[in-house]
Image (tube, grey):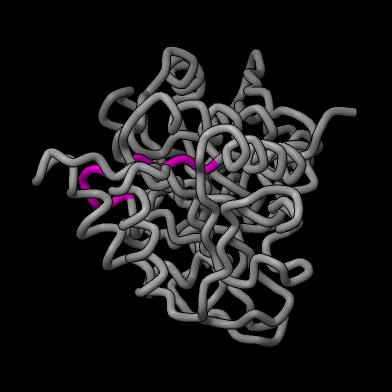
Amino acid sequence: MGRTVAEVIRETTRDHLTNHRGLFLGQCVTAVGWIGGTVPAMSEAEGIVELSLADVTNAGIAVGAALAGRRPIYTVRYQGFMWYNAAPIVNYAAKSKDVWGVPCPVFLRAIAMEGNGIGPVASASQHGLIMRMPGMPVCAPMSPNEWTEAWNWFMRHDDPLYVSEHRRSFAIDYEFHNSIEPEADITLFPISAARLNAVEAAHALRKEGILCNIQHLVWLKPFTVTDDMRHALSQTKLGLVIDSDFEIGGPSRSIAYDLMHQCGAPVFALGLEDRSAGVADALDNPTPTPERIVRAVRELVRNGRNVPAGATRE
């Protein structure tokens, strides 16, 4: 078995601090479980900074460190807290190179999760919030090699990078592979933790006689429609983008639009419901579950391509 995502992050961070004069900035860095064991112990490397519970200030510190040439890794332990961190990131890190000609390379690790009673503020993925802003590439790696690819991209460029992580990825020690079925009925384009659920849903749908192509999405911005995506959609003439962020105004609809207009096939979107998550399990607003994906795909395939807008939402 290979290294897990958490191990890759921890080892890459250690190397960055030890050999590249890097910095690691974040809240609750030493708290057990808060950031999933992805940070070296403070005794293992210099440059780990435990910040206060003041998100706007902390993001400003990360931006300042980037402007000073330290290429900081800035970790936001819950993506829901990006709403507090956004101002320095989108107004300075994302705009600095375009507006002032000064690069601001921040590696922003934003960690998503749902469930476990974390409630309406901390929960959910929020990569759509950052995708809106010019100057801020966005990716959502879920495997060891995908995370390494994101890191290598960051080290080759002088731009900030928003890395939408999900806690469900930290234990993963394998890679995802796209799949194309000879007589598939629909092509699924899952993002982040929805990738795990989409694979499970595809297995369940196969038992019903519904076959799914799966094209895993990692880079959300810039988003490129690949030849494999075109081939998969040309075969099925029907697609569904599935995301762990909100559907309305979110990445799933934006990417569905790009796919639909570049490939000439109807592509629908499925994301978080338009409501706040509660603390109780029954009130949670999770990444579309395998069951919800199965229902959406079943409806799209059986009812044809002319499904009214929003019909895939419950």
**Residue 248 is inside the magenta segment:** no
Q: Position of residue 143 (x, y in %)?
A: 68, 35
Q: Nearer the viewer, residue 221 or 72?
A: 72
**Is residue 31 shown above or below 104?**
below
**Is residue 57 shown above or below 68?**
below
Residue lying at 37% horizontally and 64% vertically, measured from the top left: 61
Q: Nearer the viewer, residue 48 or 1?
A: 48
Magenta-highlighted stretch: main secondary structure? loop
Q: Position of residue 271 (x, y in %)?
A: 49, 57
Q: Position of residue 78 (x, y in %)?
A: 56, 68
Quadrant (top left/top right/bottom left/bottom right) for the N terminus: top right
Q: Answer left or right for 168 relative to 288.
A: right
Residue ranking furthest to the right: 1
Q: Nearer the viewer, residue 283 or 125?
A: 125
User: For the magenta stretch, what is the residue range?
Assistant: 131-140
Q: Nearer the viewer, residue 106 or 311?
A: 106
